[in-house]
Image (spheres, grey):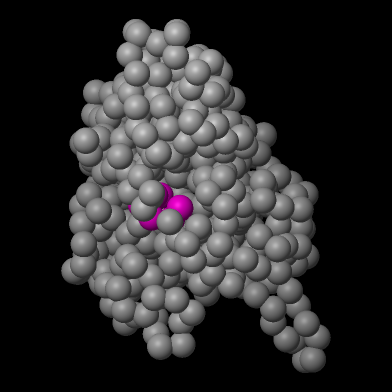
Amino acid sequence: MKKLLVGEVITPFRVFKPGGVLVDEGHILAVDHVDALKREAAQILDFGDAYILPGFVDIHVHGGGGNDTMDATPEAICNVARTHARGGTTTLFPTTLTAPMKDIKHALLAVQEVSKRNPREFEGARIPGAHVEGPYFNPEQAGAQNPEYLKVPDINEFMDLIESVKIVRRVSLAPELPGALELIKVLNDNGIIVSIGHSNARYEEVLKAVEVGATHVTHIFSGMSSLRRIKSYRIPGVLESALLLDSLTVEIIADGHHLPPSLIRLVLKCKSLGSVCGVTDAMSAAGMGRGEYTLGGLKVIVENDVVEEYEVKPRGCVAKLENREAFAGSVAFMNEMLHYLVESVGLSISDAAQLLSFNPAKIMKIDHMVGVLASGRLADIVVLDENFDVVATFVGSEEIFGTV
Ligand SMILES: [Zn+2]
């Protein structure tokens, strides 16, 4: 049955007000002004002045609703996908943590199992693949990755893993480790997105990684080297390289805690709008509230406190390691990040929506399916009220979450 969703439609490249999105059998048939589409619809869902946007695409997310990807069961992965659908996410890449290889494999097998299911069955975001974050990281930039399990790359071991699970679409690693450049090349040859993360690399080392196929940078400003001085000489790190090099796309954790508005504006001043995406990097406490949790065996506190010197007072909470010296991921939903990008950073709704839908889809090479409201794309849609709270989330033209 052809359904017409009516509201302020933001594709995100064009705005129709009042606009309509005509959907049928899981796909978008047309996007236009309401009057042009009314006749064709068998059912009209009128959302009034609400915003109708492409569903959010989260390419770096560990958990939510009390579960983590590393719980390694299909039920846990479904719960994460269902929890984030409450925040308007319609596609997500479950992300593993630094852990023993066998634990990473178990988690990936669970992701693979869920990726074969119809997301309507578990009423959650669709899962086209997994993101492997670690264990090939630099101990000096470990952040909240458990240092006990950090390793140097082992191509045979890792490619065995990738071939046995066939679900890995993205890998974050530190390119300065021995063997990393060879691994980047092999991953790139296999169509897997390689992202520089938890790295102490110098500019020259980043360039070598780019030459063999690294294209993305994991949570810019977190877990990366920046300018160092060696005997009066300035040596740029991953941060400056990421801002400088057009061939690298970057991701920002726009939960209000990880990056103040000024630093997000700096990223957008250096990078083109199309080469930046927002990710939650959310851990299991997303959607749960304050308290104590664990992350990869480390104790974590979820709270709203910020230091006095910080630029803004964010609305939501964040996860920190017990000593409060490092963040341990966000607990944000994508719609909360949209709110922050618009209200605190000052972006237009269209630009903020692009950072959370089209750009991440493009970075993961799935923009031919999701991330934009256009004819032929999957009917993955989020409807938001004027406060950016989620009114409804649609996956494959079915409402999987709704508040009315
Ligand atoms: Zn992460």
Left or right: 305, with 194 as reference point: left
- In the figure, residue 244 lies in which quadrant? bottom right
- Tell me where residue 198 appears, x and y as whole percent: 53, 64
Is 390 one of the magenta-colored residues? no
- In the figure, residue 165 lies in which quadrant? top left
Q: Which residue is drawn at 65% across and 39% down?
A: 188
- Tell me where residue 100 appears, x and y as whole percent: 36, 53
- Tell me where residue 63 appears, x and y as whole percent: 31, 50
| Nearer to us in this view, 3 or 222 | 3
Q: Give the range drawn in magenta.
A: 333-338
Residue 135 seen from this side: no
| Nearer to us in this view, 147 or 327 | 327
The answer to whether residue 359 is above or below residue 141 is above
Name the image quarter holding the N terminus. top left
Question: Of all residues shown, which one is farthest toward the bottom?
Answer: 231
Q: Residue at x 26, y 38 (%)?
A: 82
- Tell me where residue 296 appears, x and y as whole percent: 31, 60
Name the image quarter holding the C terminus. top left
Residue 392 seen from this side: yes
Left or right: 378, with 228 as reference point: left
The answer to whether residue 179 is above or below residue 315 is above
Q: Residue at x 29, y 61 (%)?
A: 295
Image label count? 0
Left or right: 232, with 202 as reference point: right
Q: Residue at x 50, y 58 (%)?
A: 341
Magenta: main secondary structure equals helix
